[in-house]
Image (cartoon, rainbow, N blue to C red):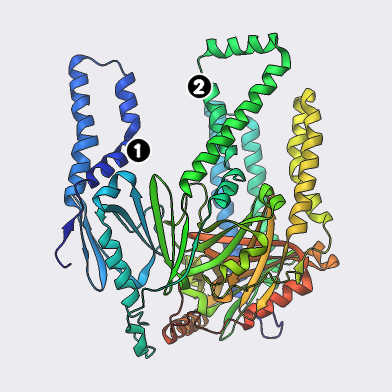
Amino acid sequence: MTKPKHTHPLGVLQQIAQALKDYWYLLVILLTARLGHLGFTISLILLILVFCGWPILRWATLTYQITPTAIIIHSGILVRHHEHIPYSRIQTVQRKQWFYLRPFQLEELLIETASHEDHTPEARLAAVPTTAAHLIARYRQTKPTTTTGSAAVIPDQTTVATDTVQAYYRINPQDLVKFGLTSMIFVPFLLVLLGLYNKLPKSMTTALVTDATHLARVLLVSAIVALIVIAWLGAFIWTLQRYYHFELTRQADQLETARGFFQRNTVSAPLNRIQAVRFKQNLLRQWLHLQTVQVLIASKAAGDEDDNDLVIMPVIQADQAMATLHPFITWLPTTLPSLTALTVPRRRYQIRNALLIVAIPLGLLSYWLPTWAWISLPILLLAALQGYFSATNTAGGLITSDLLAVQTGHWWTRDRYFIPVTKIQSLHLRQSIWMKRTHLAHLTINVRHGNHNQEIQLRYLKLSAAKHLYAWYLQSTLQRPDNPRH
Amino acid sequence: MNQSTAHHLPPRIKRIWGYSALGNLLVLLVISGLLWLAYHFWNWPLWLSIGGLMLTLLEPGIELGLIPYRYRFTRYQISDLAVDMQAGFIFQERIAIPIARVQNVTLSAGPLLQWQHLTKVTVATASTSHSIDGLELADAERLREQIMRLAQEARHDQA
């Protein structure tokens, strides 16, 4: 494919949708403003330009080439951009296929590298044939990953990677239902519903309130319960359609996930680009011993709207997680290792800190609004429990000489990370003068995540354990290829 | 960090910190002057100017007072494998950055540092960046050479 090609004309629809998403407020202004006849005509013409003319121009000026060495994208109406993306620099390739594109064998392609540009993928092709992604995948695997100008070129790097699937997982319906039911995104849903309530006409809400006083508390409570149930159901259906037929495949050195009902979303990432693996449990899932597994990658494309990591296992029984994942990411241990090397010896400090954080606002609240002072009690209790939770869940240890596992607890969510030493960007050890006496220290592990840094903080560790880890990190930083192909 | 092999910053850095505190004083003085003018002409509240003046005297004073402390507890060590930095006493911190993880090194010097022939060294990894306030030009260049050499020997960073 050497000649620049246009994307499919259906791509215009996508461009129009994007324009609507970006400039919807123009429509609102037009509909609400009182305009004369002339003003209306002018604005109508402007709107047609913004929502039809511009997208069509954008579509017409965008062309792409898939060459054996790089993907080249030409775009821009006034200022022409020519973007070259070599295969070896690609972090993730994401394919999004809306149901209406399926009959045409088309899909949207998003290609990301690790460059620091925020929010936008390097390349976004609205509607291209599905064969394009296959071609890119083939070039990516056959591409010799040459090290810059050194003698490290090994001949067998150029051999064609076999297309055989080395590991495959597909979510079963029960697990999907469990995942949906234990999802915490019903909380934002609830907030949206509450927001809608505020948007209701005043007369209606006052009528509701007077009704409520009539039927006393019963109605109010049942309304709240109904709201929560609706939010939960909404969240459930939302999650169900998003993770419908979730699949995880390992092919050669690529990991690929696919999910979604209305929009099939496929993300493929090279295994050696994985910065860390995270096992995550919200409060509900802790009780039910379920885990969600995500990988941290240096690219934003993999991110969901609600969660910035690529989910590779939506839900799995905690005791089976390691064994199930091992075939996909072979450097993970097969069983859950002991994480007792890094623990918090005394929990009182974190409880104290959590209490102190809420104490000041609560003090002010009690001073200004004495009638609301009673609310301090449950909040203080929650804060203390939160501190206790964080302290209890802080854990970690070295699994092998080049793999670190750490666990943290924040906001009732337990995160367990597995991080290869080569992906730890830097290590930060902190100790205040008061912690000298108690022989405690904080440890921060810096890992790349999306386009930014993720700090994994372990607070109030035993100083000796933290220092041991620090020394290990300083020693183990010899350049070691972490990719078996090299 | 092995205290015997760890380096202090060049002593001249103290002078630079001192001048930069004076610079802060100047800026703050200008701001308090403006606040006073605003009080005088536009009836801005008086406490703004008084607060501004107090801040003007306090901030550079504290900064100046802390220079010996800051100097004494700031140390760095650059080995073949890693950059190890240490700072602070009341809040002590140490940072380890393996040279293999360094993406780029930036040497930068403002007018004060240039005058003293020093340079600020910023070491950036794929996700974080850390800086040493002032190094002798020769040391900084050596660090940069070392990192560039290592980077050329093997480029396995996958970030």
Q: What residue type is labelled 1?
A: Lys
Judge by depth and name the residue closer to the eye, A272 or A328.
A328
Judge by depth and name the residue closer to the eye, A419 or A179.
A179
Could you tell me residue B20's position as x and y percent?
57, 60
Extreme residue in the front direction: A173
Please state if B29 lies on the left or on the right of A148 as rendered. Answer: right
Q: Which residue carries the number 2 mark? A: A199
B151 vs A103: above or below: below
B145 vs A57: above or below: below
Question: Residue at point 23% right, 64% down?
Answer: A72
Q: In which quarter of the image is residue B90?
A: bottom right
Q: Earlier in the sequence, mark 1 or mark 2?
A: 1
Q: In which quarter of the image is the N terminus of chain A?
A: bottom left
Provide the secondary structure element on which disc 2 rests.
helix
- Say if residue B105 shows up in the picture: no
Numbered tag placed on residue A21 in the rendering: 1
Q: What residue type is labelled 2?
A: Lys
Question: Residue at point 41% right, 59% down?
Answer: A267
Callouts 1 and 2 on one subunit: yes
Mark 2 is surrounded, within 10 Å at the Cα level, by few (under 14), some (14 to 19) or many (20 or more) other residues, namely few
- Say if residue B157 shows up in the picture: yes
Could you tell me residue A473's position as x and y percent?
63, 78
Letter of the chain that mark 1 sits on in the rendering: A
Provide the secondary structure element on which disc 1 rests.
helix
Q: What is the spatial separation of the Cα atoms under label 1 and label 2, in whole angstroms?
A: 21 Å
Q: Quadrant of the C terminus of chain A?
A: bottom left
